[in-house]
Each structure stands twice: as structure tokens, then as C-alpha cells.
Image (spheres, rainbow, N blue to C red):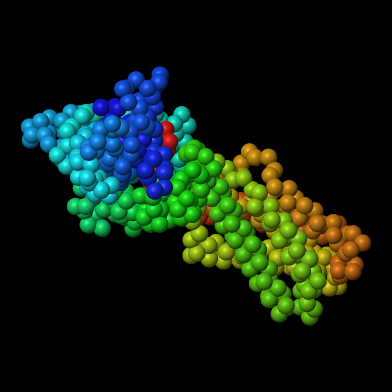
């Protein structure tokens, strides 16, 4: 039985139009050649006539070979799914039922089961028609294989679960095989969380969208089932990433939000995928999730900080412009201020939020962002106007437009530095942390606001030094501003807006071809 399985594996590979090694075939050949050839005839000693490689729809592989010295006879060798092969065998009904039950018991133990059968056919059949004569076969036996779980897979899946990423198994294998692999990897699978392709076919699109969210294993899947399940998960409000490496994974890769493939996938899959993993390690997916959430969180933080500060400045400029006889801010100062602020905000690209922030995806809610920008923009404008009021009403205050420009320039950069530190990632991320890129950039921005009016560059820009007591008054305004920011931040107003649809759940659909093992592709 193992001999004929090896003959099938060898010649379906050798006669394929595009030879592609298969993990199950490699395992069969390794077993057949272990310790040297132990059979009367090496599989390579036959003469290959025709072959049909494994197909996920037909679920079997066919090889037609000729034994040297035997004239006028070809041998048809079939290997594939138990049900499919037994349908083509000349076995009685009771015997077929017994074999089906035996194969099912092996699959429920978590083994992959292949049935092997042969038939002798006249050599006058052409090579093209011979594979279609795979009927009336003689059953030879079963080949069982146990999946070797990748050593890093369990830890990688646990890390994904910690990030709120649910893993779905979409496979052409028997349900028992997939469930066994899940248990080996620490993925809990209840009886009501397993669906077969036949059950999927019996569900409408709306029912499938509801059922797919709570289902862990989808077994006996053909390519169209994988694509439909990925689409159903998207319809259910989830963001779907699909990992696959075979041609039969292409429909699902296109149906998912993010198509993922390993580097050694077939070329057409690599070209279709949005993300290509550098190695067959699911831990890379966890790193990709962190990188995506970190960058999207930093972009969201940048928008909140930048828009709030700029709106506050614009409102303050309009109000002061109506109350004074001189421009509230010179054009050169506006450019310098924006240049300093924008340069400091580049540090957001290197910010590393608290790990707790990365456990949920960040979504840009435009309405929440508008409320945030309006509220904190108004607070920023109030701080600007309070600064100008203090400078105007302070005894022995500064005189002339240059002094007001200096006071407002210093206050603007200091408030923007506070906003960068206090509003960047929420209160949980700001406790007990050493200064990072954002902290150092904010400190440099604050130092620029204080030092520039006192430096030789101040007079050319229209700036001048302020009296000492004016700096003390500015410090009081900034302390009040910082206190209000801290209170609002502590109440959660300044926290990063998370996706609230489905509790922030994100689903990653994991695909496995029926003929591949997790040793080649971790589940």
C-alpha cells in the first residue's frame, strides 16, 4: 500500500505541468525511502504515462504508469480522500461502509487519512484518457499521517489572542484532523464551533455571516467555500486577514481585507497577496498587527494634537485681531512657530505606545475626532486669550507689539509642547515611563519657545525679552492649562478612540490546503 502511494506521489510530481512539491507527498516518499528502498521496485523505475495532480474539488490524485517488461498493460494508481477513492472502488456496500467508518475513526484521532487504490487497464488507452478510467479500482489500504506542529505556532497564536485577534481554521481536511491540531495548539474548539462545507452550503449569506463569527473550524472546504466564508466574516463587521499559499486560496485572498502569503507560496499567490511573510512563522503576524496598530495610533494622535492646537491658534488670532490695532502675530512668526511645531511632531513616527494600547485596534472615528478637536481647540484658544489678557493687564507689563508677539509666541510653543505630551496616547500610557522621542521633542519645542526671543535671532523676527514677572504669569497660565488637560485626560476624554464595532474584535482567517501539513504551514 505504501509502495503504490509512493508511485502515485512520484509520478504526479514528475508529470505535472508545473511541478510543485506537496507536503503529504514528500512525507509518503520519505517513508517509502526510509533506510533505502525496501520494495521490489523503486517508484522511479516505472515508466510514467499520464498524471492528474491532487485537486481540491476532485480530492484525489491519479497516476498512470507502465511496468517495464509488461507489454500491453498500464497500472492506474489513485490516492486521495477516503470517501472519493472508495466511491471509485469495486467494493461491496457493507465493505465500503466498514472502510469509511475505519477512515473516520482515524481522522477523529487527529490523523490525516489517504486511501490508495489501483487498477490494471489496457495500454491502448491514450495518456490523456487513462486518468479518467479510475473506476472499478482495487482498494489497497490507508496511509495515515500525523501533523507536526510548528514549535512557534502555539505561542504566536496565544499572542494574537492577547491582541484580540480571533483565528479561524479554513481547511480541506476532515473536521477531526483540524480539531486535533487546534487542541495541540491550545485553541479551544467546542462542538458547535465546527462547520463542514456541506453545512456552509446549507446557510444563506446572512445566516453564514452570523454563524461564521462564532465558528472556529471550517472543514472540507473547497476554494469557493473559503472565499464565501471570508466574505461572510467581512459582512459580519469584522476585518479579515486570510493566510494562504496555494492556488486554491486565491479566491479567499481576494475576498479578504488583507491577503497574506508566505514567501515560498506559489508565485501567483505572492503576487495577489497584500502582505508576504519573510518566513513561515505566525509570530510575524503578531508583529505586523503591532506595527499596524502603532502606526495608525500615532497617525490618530498626530491628527488630534495638530488639529486641536491649530484650531485654537486660529480662533485666538481672529479674536485678538478684532480687539487690537496691530497684527496679533507677524507672518514670519507664524511660519517659525509652525516650522518648530511640525518638526517636533515628526517624533510621533517613532513613538512607542504602552502595550495596553496595542491590545485593541485603533479606528479613526470622524465624529469623535471632530468633538475632540473642537473641545480641546476651544481650550487652547482660551489659554491663548488668557495669556494676552495677563500680558495686557499685568502691572508694569510689556509695552508694544513686539512684547505681545514675544509673550504669545512663547506661550504657543509651550502649550503645544504640553499638548504633545499629555494628549498623545491616553493616561494609561503616560504613567511611569521614561521620556521617549515625543518627550524629548516636546522639551526641545518648549526650550525653543523660551530661548528664541532672548537670542540674537529674536529682534530680526520682531521678538524681544519679557520682564521676569511676565514669565511667572505665563507659568501660572500654563499650569492652569496643564491641570485642565490632566483632568480631562483622566476622565478619558483624551484617550485614543478605539473601534467600538464588535468590541474591537478583529478576525484573522487562517487557510490550510487539504494536502499540506502544519509543519509546512503552521495552523
The residue located at (34%, 56%) in the rendering is 231
Q: Residue at x 10, y 31 (%)?
A: 95
Quadrant position of residue 435: top right
Could you say where residue 322 lies in the image, as x and y percent from the top left?
Answer: 71, 80
Q: Check the picture and name the quadrant holding the C terminus.
A: top left
User: Quick check: 468 left or right of 270?
Assistant: right
Name the residue located 41 percent from the left edge and 44 percent from the top edge: 19
Where in the figure is residue 291, as x and y percent of width and height? Answer: 56, 47
Q: Is residue 353 visible?
A: yes
Q: Is residue 462 above or below residue 135?
A: below
- Where residue 273 appears, x then y in whole percent? 47, 53
Q: Nearer the viewer, residue 35 or 307?
A: 35
Q: Nearer the viewer, residue 7 or 154?
A: 7
Residue at 45 percent across and 47 percent down: it is 266
Which percent across, then down, holds residue 96? Answer: 12, 34
Is there any visible trace of residue 469 in the rendered image?
no
Residue 467 location, quadrant: bottom right
- Determine the residue located farthest toward the right in the rendered image: 456
Q: Is 129 on the left-hand or right-hand side of 508?
A: left
Between 350 and 208, the residue placed more toward the observer is 208
Q: In the shown orientation, is residue 146 left or right of residue 436?
A: left
Amino acid at each position: 500500500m505504501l509502495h503504490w502511494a509512493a508511485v502515485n506521489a512520484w509520478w504526479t510530481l514528475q508529470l505535472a505541468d508545473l511541478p510543485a512539491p506537496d507536503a503529504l507527498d514528500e512525507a509518503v516518499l520519505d517513508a517509502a525511502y526510509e533506510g533505502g528502498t525496501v520494495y521490489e521496485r523503486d517508484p522511479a523505475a516505472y515508466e510514467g504515462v499520464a498524471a492528474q495532480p491532487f485537486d481540491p474539488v476532485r480530492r484525489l490524485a491519479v497516476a498512470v504508469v507502465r511496468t517495464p517488461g509488461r507489454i500491453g498493460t498500464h497500472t492506474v494508481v489513485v490516492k486521495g480522500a477516503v470517501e472519493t477513492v472508495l466511491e471509485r472502488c469495486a467494493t461491496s456496500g457493507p465493505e465500503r461502509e466498514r472502510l469509511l467508518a475505519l477512515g473516520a475513526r482515524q481522522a477523529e484521532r487527529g490523523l490525516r487519512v489517504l486511501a490508495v487504490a489501483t487498477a490494471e487497464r489496457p495500454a491502448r488507452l491514450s495518456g490523456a484518457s487513462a486518468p479518467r478510467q479510475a473506476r472499478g479500482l482495487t482498494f489497497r489500504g490507508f496511509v495515515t499521517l500525523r501533523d507536526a506542529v510548528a514549535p512557534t505556532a502555539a505561542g504566536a497564536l496565544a499572542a494574537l489572542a492577547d491582541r484580540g485577534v480571533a483565528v479561524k481554521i479554513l481547511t480541506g481536511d476532515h473536521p477531526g484532523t483540524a480539531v486535533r491540531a487546534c487542541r495541540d495548539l491550545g485553541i479551544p474548539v467546542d462542538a458547535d464551533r465546527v462547520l463542514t462545507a456541506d453545512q456552509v452550503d446549507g446557510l444563506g449569506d446572512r445566516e453564514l455571516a452570523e454563524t461564521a463569527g462564532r465558528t472556529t473550524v471550517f472543514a472540507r472546504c473547497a476554494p469557493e467555500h473559503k472565499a464565501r466564508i471570508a466574505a461572510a466574516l467581512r459582512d459580519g463587521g469584522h476585518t479579515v486577514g486570510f493566510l494562504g499559499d496555494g492556488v486554491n486560496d486565491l479566491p479567499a485572498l481576494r475576498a479578504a481585507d488583507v491577503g497574506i502569503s508566505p514567501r515560498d507560496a506559489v508565485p501567483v499567490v505572492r503576487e495577489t497577496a497584500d502582505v508576504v511573510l519573510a518566513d513561515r512563522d505566525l509570530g510575524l503576524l503578531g508583529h505586523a498587527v503591532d506595527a499596524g496598530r502603532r502606526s495608525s495610533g500615532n497617525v490618530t494622535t498626530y491628527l488630534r494634537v495638530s488639529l486641536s492646537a491649530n484650531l485654537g491658534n486660529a480662533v485666538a488670532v481672529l479674536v485678538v485681531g478684532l480687539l487690537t490695532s496691530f497684527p496679533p502675530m507677524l507672518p514670519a512668526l507664524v511660519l517659525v512657530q509652525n516650522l518648530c511645531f511640525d518638526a517636533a511632531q515628526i517624533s510621533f513616527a517613532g513613538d512607542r505606545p504602552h502595550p495596553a494600547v496595542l491590545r485593541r485596534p485603533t479606528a479613526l472615528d470622524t465624529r469623535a475626532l471632530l468633538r475632540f478637536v473642537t473641545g480641546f481647540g476651544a481650550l487652547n484658544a482660551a489659554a491663548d486669550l488668557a495669556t494676552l489678557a495677563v500680558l495686557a493687564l499685568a502691572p508694569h507689563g510689556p509695552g508694544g507689539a513686539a512684547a505681545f508677539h514675544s509673550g504669545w509666541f512663547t506661550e504657543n510653543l509651550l502649550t503645544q509642547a504640553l499638548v504633545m505630551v499629555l494628549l498623545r496616547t491616553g493616561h494609561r500610557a503616560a504613567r511611569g515611563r521614561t521620556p521617549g522621542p515625543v518627550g524629548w521633542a516636546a522639551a526641545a519645542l518648549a526650550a525653543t519657545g523660551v530661548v528664541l526671543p532672548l537670542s540674537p535671532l529674536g529682534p530680526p523676527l520682531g521678538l524681544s525679552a519679557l520682564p521676569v514677572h511676565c514669565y511667572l504669569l505665563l507659568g501660572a497660565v500654563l499650569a492652569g492649562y496643564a491641570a485642565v488637560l490632566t483632568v480631562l485626560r483622566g476622565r478619558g476624554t483624551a484617550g485614543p478612540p478605539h473601534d467600538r464595532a464588535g468590541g474591537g474584535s478583529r478576525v484573522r482567517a487562517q487557510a490550510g490546503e487539504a494536502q499540506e501539513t502544519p509543519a509546512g504551514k503552521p495552523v
